[in-house]
């Protein structure tokens, strides 16, 4: 059995990125991060087109011995980096792949897990991107990991993976050392999300790992679906964390607005800040939701919908939408209070003018 393990680590940058500005400003060749699909797809189907800003092949000292890894870094305009580490393998059986789930890199006399190793790469790249970052926001979340075991050479007929090896596949994707101990219910749950386009290929996905069997090794389109779904999950988690801070601060600002006794101290700044945040977040969530057009009953559309279900993307979208609604309600209350104070000020000015007018007439009389 031969193939490669593809490790994804997706990092939120904390700001949007102008990809066109980077291409025009930096004098270096950028590669397209997009791979065309060889399977039937509707004309409206669209993949996001990031910049592949870094591609390298290097030898790594690891806890599994020396490995040769291909490392790619893709930059997305919504403000995310996808670091992709690809390591070839040869194995007798599926369970021999399980140690890759705990891959550790030995560097500079210390051992680091893949999150730490990729995090170091991300930090160096983000430093170079600072001039191109826009609409920065303060929200830090853990990187989104995903592992795909890609088998391109196997003596086992692909249908045996879905029959004889069902439990082994489940254990591999769950990183469980005891395949025989896994319950039938857990095996059935994993195998609710499997797909096959040709008679000799297979895709099985779980919430943090997937298995792809493809003799032609033409699985870049499937990998791209996994990458985009994880990217959407990362950004929804980030916006959820950011909205927690924003909504808490908005409530404090609203309390402060009502606590101001003087009508001369309006809440204009508070309302303006709330409006800007609401608009920025609405635009950001719109961009994330529209980063690809992958829904439909075609093969990759099915894989994407399975990712949406498994990653609970709709629940994350609902969380973000609910907090956006809370923010909108706070904005409406603050705006109404601001308008009420303006009307009161206008009424006081009218009364003052009337009094002044009466005083002037009295002196003239």
Image (cartoon, rainbow, N blue to C red):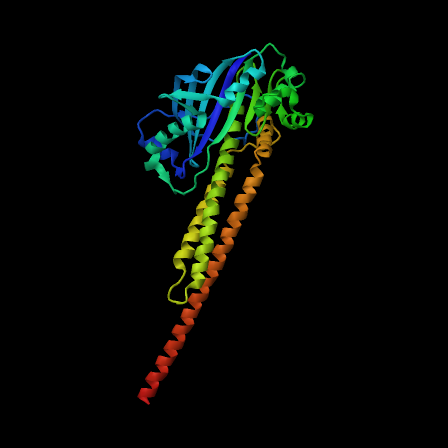
Q: Is residue 331 left or right of residue 355?
A: right
| In-front residue for pair 5/15 | 5
Vertical comparison of 246 with 178: above or below? below
Query: How many marks overall?
Result: 0
Q: Is residue 211 left or right of residue 17?
A: right
- Report whether residue 251 is seen: yes
Vertical comparison of 69 with 246: above or below? above
Residue furthest right in the image: 184
Residue 235 placement (x, y as % from top left): 48, 37
Quarter the N terminus occupies? top right
Residue furthest front in the image: 109
Vertical comparison of 339 with 173: above or below? below
Residue furthest top in the image: 155
Residue 201 placement (x, y as % from top left): 60, 18
Find residue 30 and report its image quarter: top left
| In-front residue for pair 6/44 | 6
Q: Is residue 365 left or right of residue 64?
A: left
Residue 183 placement (x, y as % from top left): 67, 25
Residue that appears at 40% across and 69% down:
345
Quarter the C terminus occupies? bottom left
- Report whether residue 39 is seen: no
Residue 193 placement (x, y as % from top left): 63, 27
Find residue 254 and report its image quarter: bottom left
Vertical comparison of 220 with 270: above or below? above
């Amino acid at each position: 059995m031969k193939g490669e393990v593809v490790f994804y680590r997706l990092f939120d940058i904390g700001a949007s990125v102008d990809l066109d500005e980077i291409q025009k400003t930096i004098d270096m060749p950028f590669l397209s991060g997009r791979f065309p699909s060889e399977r039937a797809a509707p004309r409206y189907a669209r993949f996001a087109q990031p910049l592949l800003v870094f591609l390298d092949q290097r030898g790594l000292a690891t806890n599994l011995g020396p490995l040769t890894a291909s490392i790619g870094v893709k930059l997305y305009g919504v403000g995310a980096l996808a670091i992709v580490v690809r390591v070839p393998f040869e194995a007798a059986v599926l369970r021999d792949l399980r140690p890759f789930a705990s891959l550790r890199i030995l560097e500079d006399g210390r051992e680091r897990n893949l999150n730490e190793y990729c995090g170091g790469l991300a930090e160096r790249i983000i430093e170079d991107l600072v001039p191109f970052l826009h609409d920065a926001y303060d929200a830090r979340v853990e990187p989104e990991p995903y592992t795909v075991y890609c088998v391109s050479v196997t003596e086992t007929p692909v249908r045996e993976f879905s029959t004889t090896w069902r439990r082994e596949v489940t254990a591999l994707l769950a990183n469980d050392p005891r395949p025989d101990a896994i319950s039938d219910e857990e095996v059935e749950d994993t195998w609710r999300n499997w797909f096959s386009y040709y008679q000799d290929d297979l895709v099985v996905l779980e919430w943090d790992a997937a298995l792809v069997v493809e003799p032609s090794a033409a699985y870049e389109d499937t990998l791209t679906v996994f990458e985009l779904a994880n990217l959407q999950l990362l950004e929804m988690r980030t916006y959820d964390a950011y909205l927690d801070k924003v909504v808490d601060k908005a409530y404090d600002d609203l309390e402060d607005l009502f606590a101001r006794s003087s009508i001369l101290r309006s809440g204009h700044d508070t309302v303006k800040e709330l409006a800007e945040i609401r608009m920025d977040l609405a635009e950001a969530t719109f961009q994330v939701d529209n980063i690809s057009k992958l829904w439909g009953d075609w093969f990759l559309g099915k894989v994407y919908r399975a990712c949406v279900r498994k990653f609970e993307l709709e629940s994350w979208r609902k969380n973000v939408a609910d907090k956006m609604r809370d923010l909108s309600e706070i904005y409406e209350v603050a705006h109404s209070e601001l308008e009420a104070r303006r009307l009161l000020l206008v009424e006081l000015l009218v009364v003052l003018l009337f009094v002044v007018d009466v005083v002037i007439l009295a002196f003239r009389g």
